[in-house]
Amino acid sequence: MKSIELLDLQIEIKDFLHSNNKIETYHHCITVGEYAYNLAKKSLADPNKAKIAGFLHDISAIYPNDQRVDVAKKLEIPLCKEEIKFPMIIHQKISRQTALDIFKITDPEILSAIECHTTLKGGYSDLDLVVFVADKIKWDQTGEPPYFSGLMDALNQSLEHAAYYYIEYLLNNDIKVVHPWLMDAYKELRNKLQIDL
Ligand SMILES: [Fe+2]
Ligand SMILES: [Fe+2]
């Protein structure tokens, strides 16, 4: 995507979120996209893909949690029992579908990174990893995340160390439900990083 097209996309995203009273989500998405782009410059052939995935990763914030099961059903998105129990997680899949249907993003790598930005997944790509980690560093709440300094230390080693650090933090803290994709990613990272339990 050329820089002029990227700018057009950014404007479209702003209009979409603004008209749905979600301008804070817009700022979060742009921050994550820019940060993901900078991370991706070190590891990806096309860092713009990370920027686009970041820009769109939380586009489904227009749907509140109590509507997400119904929206997913309407869009024919398959759900697992963990998602029905804790609908917040569904937003990653609805964002993917919205990126495809409304913003006409067809690149499967970008769609994958949007779809697993909350949980990561087994068989993750470098792009998936970049967007997952960027979203955790530039989180959507105020102040610094409680895991921030440990995550940044881990990131000095690699993106995979950073992702592993974050998932382990989640599992040791107040996680509501363990999504199967999160567990698959955790096991894969543990094997790759050769971490013994
Ligand atoms: Fe998200
Ligand atoms: Fe986010």
Image: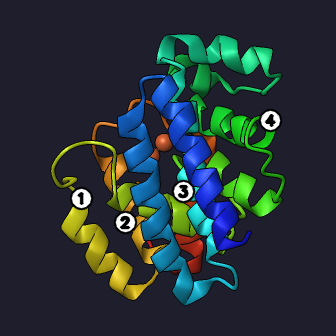
Q: Secondary structure at mark 1?
A: loop
Q: CA distance from mark 2 to mark 1?
A: 9 Å
Q: Earlier in the sequence, mark 2 or mark 1?
A: 1
Q: CA distance from mark 3 to mark 4?
A: 17 Å
The amino acid beneath tag 1 is Tyr
Mark 2 residue crowding within 10 angstroms, few (<14) / some (14–19) / many (20+): many
Q: Quadrant of the C terminus?
A: bottom left
Q: CA distance from mark 4 to mark 2?
A: 34 Å
Position of residue 31 in the picture relative to residue 120 (left or right): left
Task: Identify the disc placed on residue 147.
Answer: 1
The amino acid beneath tag 4 is Asp
Report if the CB atoms under discs 3 and 2 are less than 8 Å apart: no
Q: Position of residue 185 (x, y in %)?
A: 59, 58
Q: CA distance from mark 3 to mark 2?
A: 21 Å
Q: Position of residue 6 (x, y in %)?
A: 64, 62
Residue holding disc 3? 54
Q: Vertically, is 163 above or below 126?
A: above
Q: Nearer the viewer, residue 62 or 147?
A: 62
Residue holding disc 2? 165
Q: CA distance from mark 1 to mark 4?
A: 35 Å
Q: Earlier in the sequence, mark 1 or mark 4?
A: 4
**What's the coloring here?**
rainbow
Camera-side mark, 1 or 3: 3
Residue holding disc 4? 101
Q: Secondary structure at mark 2?
A: helix
Q: CA distance from mark 1 to mark 3?
A: 20 Å
Give residue 98's quadrant in the image.
Answer: top right
